[in-house]
Image (cartoon, rainbow, N blue to C red):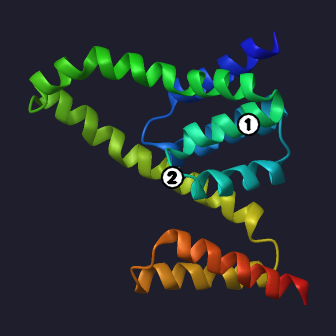
Amino acid sequence: MIYLSLFIAFLKIGAFSFGGGYAMLPLIEEEIVLINQWLTHQEFIDIIAISQMSPGPIAVNAATFVGYKHIGISGAIVATIGVVFTSFILVTTLAKVIIKYYNSTIVTGIFSGIRPAVIGLIAAACVSLFRSSIVDFKSLIIGLAVLGILYKTKLHPISVIMFSGVLGIIIFSI
């Protein structure tokens, strides 16, 4: 039964989240932390951080980590299949139709409506992550430093994450 619950939770996430992993974060948080209570909010934030550092889509990585933490390797497999299942079916089914009618007013209208919604979902995820990650003045300084570094330079995100980890050791150990 737990496997079915895990599969259905991530199937819903994959089916009803458009725009990539960041747009999925509010739904992942709702399903995993609030509804099923498989993770605490802090564990969810940690898994998102790990998912961002790992190669691959954030939603797939998050599903794999949640499934593994909750059940083990079999849980990781079930959650990962759940989150990609709907996308796989939709992409393989609709690819020909979208390509054929890509320049039609209906398809153009659909994508014109979806794009701003995706930005709203990403913004909601940012607000949620900000609230739980910026817990004091020290974490605010790290967050603002990273924002400034990434805005002003072309540093690779892995370098910035490693720098932030070292900075966290220094700042939070004092």
Q: Which residue is mark 2?
A: 122
Label 2 and label 1: CA atoms lie apart by 21 Å
Labels 2 and 1 touching (C-beta < 8 A): no
* Amino acid tagged 2: Ile
Where residue 53 sits in the image (x, y, percent)?
59, 58
Q: Which residue is mark 1?
A: 66
Vertical arrangement, residue 111 with respect to residue 95, above or below: below
Q: Residue furthest top?
A: 1
- Looking at the rendered image, the quarter that the N terminus falls into is top right
Describe residue 17's horizontal placement relative to residue 43 as left or right.
Answer: left
Name the residue: 50% across, 44% down.
Answer: 57
Describe residue 159's horizontal placement relative to residue 155 as left or right.
Answer: right
* Amino acid tagged 1: Val
Where residue 27 sits in the image (x, y, percent)?
63, 37
Vertical arrangement, residue 44 with respect to residue 159, above or below: above
> Disc 1 on helix, strand or loop?
helix
The residue nearer to you, when weighing 144 against 123, is: 144
Observer-side mark, 2 or 1, equals: 1
| Residue 137 seen anywhere in this rendered image of the structure | no
The residue nearer to you, when weighing 68 against 15, is: 68
The residue nearer to you, when weighing 111 against 148, is: 148
Mark 2 vs 1, N-terminal side: 1
